[in-house]
C-alpha cells in the first residue's frame, strides 16, 4: 500500500489490525455476533458478484496504491513508516500485524520450501512490532520473486477473502446493505481491522448504530451509510497515518450522494487529489 499521505516520523499505533493474530477465528463466524439478514434486504448482485468485486479491488487500489491496476500489487512491498513493518501485496499485508505471517504460512503449507518459507521464524518474532530483524536485506527481493508464482498470488487472494472481503460482505448482507454499503464495510475493514480498539471496524459500526439503523433493522440505507461514514472519518482522524479522509470524502460519499447504492459504473472519484474513472 502506498499511503502517500502517511507520516513517517515515529511509530503509529497498530490500530489497523490488532485482531489479526486471531483472524482465523474471527473470520470463521459472522462479525459482532450478527444473525442472518431478513430475506430480500440485500440486492441479488452484491459485492461478491465477480464484476462488482473487480470494481471493489480497483477502488481500494486507487486509495492504497494510487493505481487501478490492483493485480500489479502482488509484488509490491515497502516499509511506509507507519509502525507496522513491511506492507506488501494486494491488500497491504503487514509484517507487524500478523496477516503477513498468516499469508506466508499458508503459502508454505501449500508449497513447502518456497522462497519465503525460510522467513517464517523471523515473521513470528517481529509480529506486533515494526522490526525488520531477520528479514533484511533480502526479504523484499524474495517477496517480489514469490509474486511471480501463481500459488503465492492465489494465497494472497484467499487470505484477502478470508480475513477482509468475505467478513465485510457477510456483515453488509446481514445489515441489509446493497453493494455500495458492502464496499464501504470492506474498505473500513481493510484499513482498520476488526479488533477491540475504538477505531476498529466493529466499533465504527457501533458508533454508526448509535445514530441510525441499517435497513435490516428498519432504517434508511442512505441515512445509515452516512452515519457509518461519519464514524469512519472520526476513526481515521485518530491516527496521523490515516488523517487524509479523501477516500471517504471524494469517493465513497460521492457514490452515496449520487444514490448509486448498487455501485454501478460509470464511476468517477478522487483520492488524494488524483482522479479515477471506471466506465
Image (tube, rainbow, N blue to C red):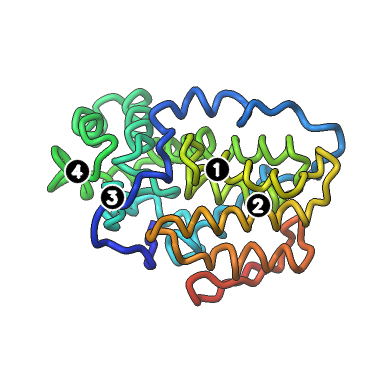
SS for callout 4: loop
Q: Residues within 10 Å of mark 3 (few under 14, many from 20)?
A: many
User: Quarter of the image containing the N terminus?
Assistant: bottom left
Left or right side of 2 for 32? right
Q: Is residue 69 visible?
A: no
Q: Position of residue 91 (x, y in %)?
A: 45, 48
Q: Which residue appears at 28% of the width and 48% of the height?
A: 86
Mark 1 highlights which residue? 201
Mark 2 highlights which residue? 228
Left or right side of 112 for 249? right
Left or right side of 190 for 173? right
Q: Is residue 28 above or below residue 134?
A: above
Q: Gap in Å between the C-alphas at discs 2 and 4?
A: 34 Å
Nearest the eye: 124 or 243: 243
What mark, if any, has residue 131 been given in the picture? Answer: 4
Question: Quick one: label 2 or label 4, which is nearer the N terminus?
Answer: 4
Mark 3 highlights which residue? 83
SS for callout 2: helix
Q: Are marks 1 and 3 in contact (CB under 8 Å)?
A: no
Amino acid at each position: 500500500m502506498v499511503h502517500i499521505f502517511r507520516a513517517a516520523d515515529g511509530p503509529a499505533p497498530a490500530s489497523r489490525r490488532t485482531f489479526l493474530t486471531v483472524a482465523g477465528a474471527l473470520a470463521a463466524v459472522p462479525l459482532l455476533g450478527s444473525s442472518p439478514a431478513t430475506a430480500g434486504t440485500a440486492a441479488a448482485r452484491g459485492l461478491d458478484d465477480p464484476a462488482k468485486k473487480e470494481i471493489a479491488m480497483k477502488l481500494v487500489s486507487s486509495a492504497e496504491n494510487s493505481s487501478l491496476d490492483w493485480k500489479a500489487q502482488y509484488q509490491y512491498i515497502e516499509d511506509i513508516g507507519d509502525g507496522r513493518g513491511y506492507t506488501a501485496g494486494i491488500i497491504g499485508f503487514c509484517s507487524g500485524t500478523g496477516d503477513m505471517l498468516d499469508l506466508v504460512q499458508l503459502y508454505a503449507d501449500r508449497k513447502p520450501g518456497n522462497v519465503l518459507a525460510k522467513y517464517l521464524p523471523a515473521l513470528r518474532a517481529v509480529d506486533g512490532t515494526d522490526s525488520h530483524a531477520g528479514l533484511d536485506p533480502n526479504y523484499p527481493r524474495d517477496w517480489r520473486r514469490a509474486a511471480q508464482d501463481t500459488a503465492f498470488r492465489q494465497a494472497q487472494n484467499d487470505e484477502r477473502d478470508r480475513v477482509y472481503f468475505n467478513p465485510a460482505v457477510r456483515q453488509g448482507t446481514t445489515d441489509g446493505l446493497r453493494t455500495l454499503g458492502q464496499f464501504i464495510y470492506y474498505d473500513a475493514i481493510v484499513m482498520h481491522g476488526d479488533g477491540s480498539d475504538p477505531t476498529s471496524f466493529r466499533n465504527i459500526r457501533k458508533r454508526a448504530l448509535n445514530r441510525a439503523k441499517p435497513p435490516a433493522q428498519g432504517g434508511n440505507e442512505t441515512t445509515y451509510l452516512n452515519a457509518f461514514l461519519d464514524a469512519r472519518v472520526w476513526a481515521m482522524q485518530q491516527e496521523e497515518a490515516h488523517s487524509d479522509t479523501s477516500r471517504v470524502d471524494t469517493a465513497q460519499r460521492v457514490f452515496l450522494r449520487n444514490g448509486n447504492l448498487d455501485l454501478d459504473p460509470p464511476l468517477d472519484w478522487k483520492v488524494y487529489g488524483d482522479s479515477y474513472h471506471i466506465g
